[in-house]
Image (spheres, rainbow, N blue to C red):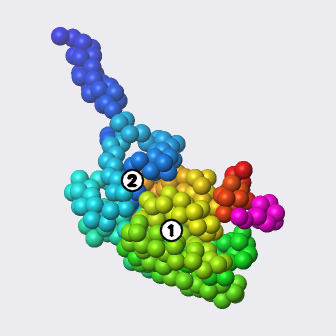
Amino acid sequence: MQRRDFLGVLGGAVAWPLSARAQQPEPTRRIAVLTGYAANDPLSQPRIAAFLQGLSELGWSDSRNLQIDYRWTGADVEQIKEFAKELVALEPDVILAQSTPVTAALQRETTGIPIVFVIVSDPVGAGFVANLARPGGNITGFINLEESMGGKWLELLKEVAPAVKHAAIMFNPDTAPGGGGFFLHSFEAAGAVLGVKPIVAPVRSPSEIEKVIGDLAREPDGGLVLMSDIFLQLNRKQVMTLAERHKLPVIYWLGAFAKEGGLLGYGPDYYDLFRRSASYVDRILKGEKPSNLPVQVPTKFELVINLKTAKAIGLTVPPMLLTRADEVIE
């Protein structure tokens, strides 16, 4: 064999593995998604779709370079704990945790796997992070509501129904932020300013929801604030039905609930939060540590008013409030 022929063969031997490597598919990373909501909730899938869209914009795609494991819990606290163990055992590269109870369950199972939370109101008080600027552990994420929202909801309730003299704030102590205490101070402080008697209304079952609403309706000029809570999201239709039956004004923590038949909804754009959460998953997959990623706050809020519901319970919505609404359901 001549020298030039030998070098040609050698060159081909070196070039072949390089070419093969270039044609190999991208390495697959594994992420897990644990949600406190039910898979068949009309709000659940669009939120996950927003998260997947955010990932896609950053170059990640399920079945191409990602494997995604989903678990839905339907606000069942025991199932949340069970699925947290199950997902941690899979050893994913990062976990997306939806809601405070879900994040708490995952925190009990791992201090090593990175966790990005979304729809958590009080991550410092819950012990998930040391502070918002520098979380300091394996957990970071996106706040949905700040403590002052309890007062803001009561202000809006009083604005849409000026006759309200007493109002309850409803929550499930097992699933609400801070066991239900997170929004209470601002709610009670607003009540003192507005001349509204504040009532604390913990509930753990549909029958207790019915009792609270019935008791409120027995006295004139009552109202209801629904606290951010995976249990109340699961049972929101019952609240809407009872509120219309008893002609009780209710404010919800999401504009989407007014679109479904609630009177008034005010809160952050959850689809935007889920889309933004993809950026932290991306950064962690690329090597950044959750401890160095500051907790983010919502940047988009929406106020939605349902005039059909207002008419059904005998309310006339003040024109000034209508002008501030992002959407009015006729």
Visible residue check, residue 150: no
Q: Quadrant of the N terminus?
A: top left
Residue toward you, 17 or 52? 52
SS class, disc 2: loop
**Residue furthest to the top:** 1
Nearest to N terminus: mark 2 or mark 1 = 2
Disc 2: which residue: 38
- Left or right of 193, for residue 127: left
Name the mark on residue 228. 1
Give the residue at x 39% y 53%. 38
Residue interval drawn in magenta: 314-323
Residue most extreme to the bottom: 192
Residue at 36%, 57% in the rendered image? 74
Which of the 4 quarters of the picture holds residue 160?
bottom right
Report whether 160 appears left or right of 74.
right
Closer to the camera, 259 or 28? 259
Residue 265 appears at what percent x and percent y?
A: 62, 62
